[in-house]
Image: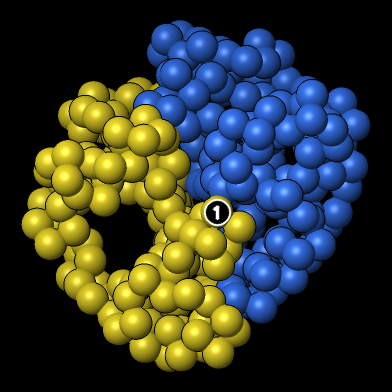
Chain colours: A yellow, B blue
Amino acid sequence: MEARAIHHVGVAVDDLDAAVATYERLFGGRLEHRERVEEQGVEAASMRIGDSRVELLAALGEDTPVGRFLAKRGPGMHHVAYAVDDVEAALTSLAAAGAELIDPRPRRGMFGLEVAFVHPESAHGVLSEVVSVG
Amino acid sequence: MEARAIHHVGVAVDDLDAAVATYERLFGGRLEHRERVEEQGVEAASMRIGDSRVELLAALGEDTPVGRFLAKRGPGMHHVAYAVDDVEAALTSLAAAGAELIDPRPRRGMFGLEVAFVHPESAHGVLSEVVSVG
């Protein structure tokens, strides 16, 4: 798989409003989009930081992936997402390279884009995502 | 402070050679630079992933910042670095915005670039770095 670039860095936070304000104040971030993604159990705020993007993630409940992450590890870096032309093709390539896929098929993420996650065990502890920008 | 973009994502790993190979195989990464930075206690491999960069970090010993991170949390995402025009100016701006600075003055990082770190408590659990590209 040839990733085009880092699409965003995902950060799990306790307080979404406070985190948006922090990223504005410290790094000159601009909120470009905010969305509840019920099926992922998160409310997400996409911040532009210059030409890049940080996705702030608050849990919609304790029994959600981000809720469990926060309970176990506290706020902090949650995942890295790579922009790819085609998520389906990326998943085929990742599986052939021996990666363990959390999502064997693309699903809908922020902005309505197709996304899929790769298990952190396959990438030295980093939960990795591919996002279709093709 | 107006960051230009994410300069790199830092990832703490147990085995640098294995991690380089994984990032090549899974994400089409290309090793652009490998360096021991004794004063930070790391051996680092900078991988280009498309237009972006992931910095893989192995500890030179247990009693180093990355060694302690690995002992406590295991391999995984370690920090996010933002490209700025001027680290000194960024530090002044960050301090004025209330950020707690790990490095009150710039120091030398990878590629000989000026860098400085901001305490994770100031950025919702994310160890944040500014890197001069000006």
Q: Count numbered badges in the picture.
A: 1
**A117 relative position to B59: left or right:** left
Residue at mark 1: chain: A
B45, above or below A74, in the image? below
**Is the residue A95 above or below the residue A54 in the image?**
below
Note whether residue A48 is visible.
no
Q: Residue B15's spot in the image, x, y percent?
A: 77, 55
Quadrant in which the C terminus of chain B is drawn: top right
Q: Residue at x 15, y 52 (%)?
A: A41
- In the displayed structure image, the side of residue B20 where residue B28 appears, left or right: left
* Residue receiving disc 1: A125
Nearer to us in this view, A118 or A72: A72
- Could you say where residue B79 lies in the image, as x and y percent from the top left? 57, 38
Q: Position of residue A21 (x, y in %)?
A: 26, 26
The foreground one among B16 and A114 is B16
Q: Residue at x 90, y 31 (%)?
A: B38
Give the residue drawn at x 33%, y 42%: A69
In the image, residue B20 sits, relative to residue A98, either above or below, namely above
Label 1 secondary element: loop
| Quarter occupied by residue A89 | bottom left
Instruction: From the viewer's perspective, tell me whether residue A44 is left or right of residue B97.
Output: left
What residue is shown at x 79% (from left), y 24% (from top)? Answer: B63
Q: Can I make out residue B98 in this image?
A: yes
Q: Is residue B91 left or right of residue B61?
A: left
User: Are there few (<14), some (14-19), or many (20+) residues within 10 Å of tag 1?
Assistant: some
Q: Amino acid at mark 1?
A: Gly
Q: Quadrant of residue B58?
A: top right
